[in-house]
Amino acid sequence: MRTIPFSPPRIDDKTIQAVTEVLKSGWITTGPKTRLLEQRINEYCETPQSLCLNSWTNAAELVLRWFGVGEGDEVIIPAYTYAATANIVKHIGATPILIDCAMDSFLIDLEAIQSKITSRTKVIMPVDIGGLPIDYDFVMELVKKNDVKSLFNPSTKNQELLGRILVLSDAAHSFGADYKGRKVGNQTDVAGFSFHAVKNFTTAEGGAVTFNLPEPFNNGEIRASLNISALHGQTKDALSKTQAGQWRYDIIEAGYKCNMTDIHAAIGLVEFDRYAETLNRRKEICDRYTTNLKDLSKAILPGFSNPYSDSCYHLYMLRIQGFEENDRDDLITDLALKGISTNVHFQPIPLLSYYKNLGYKMSDYPNAWNQYKNEISLPVYYDLSNDDVDFICDSIIEAVNSKA
């Protein structure tokens, strides 16, 4: 029987050699490789500053803390996202305000956002799903509207300086995607990427934020401040302290511990050298799925572009018309019995016990439910062969038709 995993990382001799070089160098924590990776991100995303950390989650949470979001504040997020988007809001004591998907879309209903904005709204955190970006300009224009700005009630210096709602885009899925001809990462105030093991671009574990805040903010100073926050509030990192006579440091805040190591950054630098090749192969796989499944009458095929953006092909999110949740789960089991690993992206936030117990109800988000109940994510990774793609499609067609 074949064994087709869902999304293994691309690890080969180049990756192993890069990590081995770091291990042999004697410097394995945050250092020159991490800083070089940040430089590459700045160039790729055409953004003034970036900071690599140990996860998207910690990177985005540091931004919320820097902006002063806390008890009594609200952060607008989509109902259709991974739990991390909501969890970081809860970590800082604020309230997640959920918005349903747009009709027949995995993306947030942009037209519904304004009705949820109150004097307590401090941040809007839209989410790119499956590699396809949301319409960033729509959200940026929204927060700058006079009637929206008039509701903003700043409670910290940074909030007063911005004078409006902060837009922190959850771009965990969309590193390498295009928005209006430019790479994602420079369209909103701050963008956050995930480099987790299953992502297109991986550092095994890790993430990054890019900073594009307007004047009078200095993005370099913000990056430096968050870098201190990520190292226990320490004014020097470990590499700086190794310089002759430079051991002394200070602690200027009760910070956190979420820096990226050079071991992880070395993996990311290899990923950069071949990322165009990776994205091309992922596109070929997704296109082959679409070609093979287009005649399956029940298949609702995913889109990978719209008038303003092009996907980075992170996920192939197939839906099966007429299927309910149990039918989809049976299909997952049928495929697993043939050695095919699949997944579901995602269980909407109101389905999860923690948030359900807080009073969020799935019935309030019907579009999110309709997208979720019959969604199945198919394997997409660089080393997936065309023969395996064809086998997966044949297996899906057989299983779906057997339920007719």
Image (cartoon, rainbow, N blue to C red):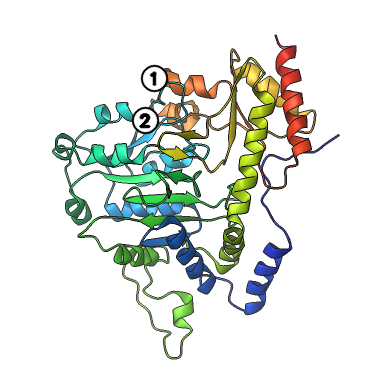
Mark 2 belongs to which amino acid?
Leu
C-beta proximity under 8 Å, tags 2 and 1: yes
SS at mark 2?
strand
Residue 224: image location, x then y, percent? 35, 67
Q: Which quadrant is the N terminus positioned in?
A: top right
Seen from the viewer's position, the closer of residues 203 and 391 is: 391
As drawn, the residue found furthest toward the bottom would be 244
Q: Position of residue 327 (x, y in %)?
A: 65, 16
Relative to 53, does residue 293 appear above or below in the rendering? above
Note whether residue 252 is visible.
yes
Residue drawn at x 58%, y 37% is 315
Q: Which comes sooner in the sequence, label 2 or label 1? A: 2
The amino acid type of the residue labelled 1 equals: Asp
In the image, 273 versus 165, the foreground residue is 273
Question: Dividing the picture into quarters, in which one does residue 342 lie?
Answer: top right
Residue bearing the label numbered 2? 98
Residue behind mark 1: 364
Look at the image and tell me in which quarter the C terminus lies.
Answer: top right
The residue lying at 51 percent from left, 63 percent from top is 260
On residue 255, the disc is none
**Residue 312 % position (x, y):** 53, 43
Q: Is residue 98 left or right of residue 26?
A: left
The answer to whether residue 191 is left or right of residue 117 is: right
Q: CA distance from mark 2 to mark 1?
A: 10 Å
